[in-house]
Image: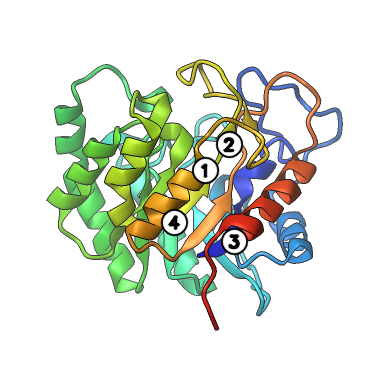
Amino acid sequence: MRVGIDSYSYHRLYGEVRPGEAPRSEEPWPPDPRPVVEHALQLGVDDLFLETCYLPPPGTLSVEPPASLRIGFSWGHPWPAGAHHGLDGGRSPAAEADLADWIAAAARHGHRLMRITLGSPASRGTEPASELIARLIDPVRRAADRAAAHGLTLAIENHGDLRAAELVEVIERVERPNLAVTLDNVNLIRVGDDMLDGVRRLAPWTALVQLKDHLPGDPTVVGGPVCTALGAGVAPLEAILDLLVAAGFDGPVCVELASLGPGRVDELELIERSVDWLRAHLPRAVV
């Protein structure tokens, strides 16, 4: 397995404040990947996934990946206001067009794996899951075919919109070999899945992991439970890694910080502690 960071960990630095978080007093970073790339290089991680909502438009984006760092993209977070909630639950041709533009950008920048979302908790609505799944099949199939033309795999995140079994159903019905899962362990409990049962179900499909630890509390609150450094919370992280190993997973495991709570937080320090935890606990390839 490889040590990585997802740039959502820096969301407050870019100016996004989730429900219940304390805003920073400093000016937010502009839409520029360089501060995140520099931090990732300082920490010596293997992979960095850049959230496209914190980047310039795909047609103008230019990132020179250093030889020591694999850079990929995470598409589909609904920020700033008015942005698409991933594929908007299959309701939006404009969301498909935006994803197509980012697929082309991802292909130009070399990483063969791209995280996408199909929706979000805010876009989920109250319709039966069967209706949402049925509407998603054709848009996801079209996206997978576009990605395949560029040699890309799309890893769909369980993004608080679908339960684990429902996400597997989408992938199985779409029937495209370049579809996989981005596993977010905390999003499992936000929609009512048991964390370890959900990991067990998704692990055979998983190509990318966004690993979170969290403090005790109701996981269904708006924004989700408060995140902390890996190893400092209550998530069964080592059991999660055991399940991934058993399923043969050997891809990137990325630090991701989501809701940070109302207190003063140093996210850079939390990221650094989390990278140290991954280095101490991830199975590594034997050379």
Residue 52 visible, this orientation: yes
Left or right: 26 with respect to 45?
right
Marks 1 and 2: in contact by CB < 8 Å?
A: yes
Q: Earlier in the sequence, mark 2 or mark 3?
A: 3
For image coordinates 57% across by 21% down, the residue present is: 216
Viewer-side residue, 214 vs 63: 214
Provide the secondary structure element on which disc 3 rests: strand
> Badge 4 is on which residue?
208
User: Which amino acid type corresponds to the residue marked 4 in the rendered image?
Assistant: Leu
Which labelled disc corresponds to residue 237?
A: 1
> Badge 3 is on which residue?
3
For image coordinates 63% across by 68% down, the residue present is: 62
Residue 105 at x, y percent in the picture: 49, 65
Left or right: 89 with respect to 232?
left
> Badge 2 is on which residue?
213
Q: Quadrant of residue 187?
A: top left
Q: CA distance from mark 4 to mark 1?
A: 15 Å
Q: Earlier in the sequence, mark 1 or mark 3?
A: 3
Crowding at label 1, few (<14), some or many (≥20) Cα neighbours within 10 Å?
Answer: some
User: Which image quarter holds the C terminus?
Assistant: bottom right
Q: Earlier in the sequence, mark 4 or mark 1?
A: 4
Up the image or down, 224 lies above or below 197; here it is: above
For image coordinates 29% across by 72% down, the residue present is: 149
Q: CA distance from mark 4 to mark 3?
A: 11 Å
Residue 99 visible, this orientation: no
Mark in the foreground, 4 or 1: 1
User: Which amino acid type corresponds to the residue marked 1 in the rendered image?
Assistant: Leu
For image coordinates 22% across by 65% down, the residue present is: 177
Crowding at label 3, few (<14), some or many (≥20) Cα neighbours within 10 Å?
Answer: many
Up the image or down, 10 lies above or below 33; here it is: above
Q: CA distance from mark 2 to mark 1?
A: 8 Å
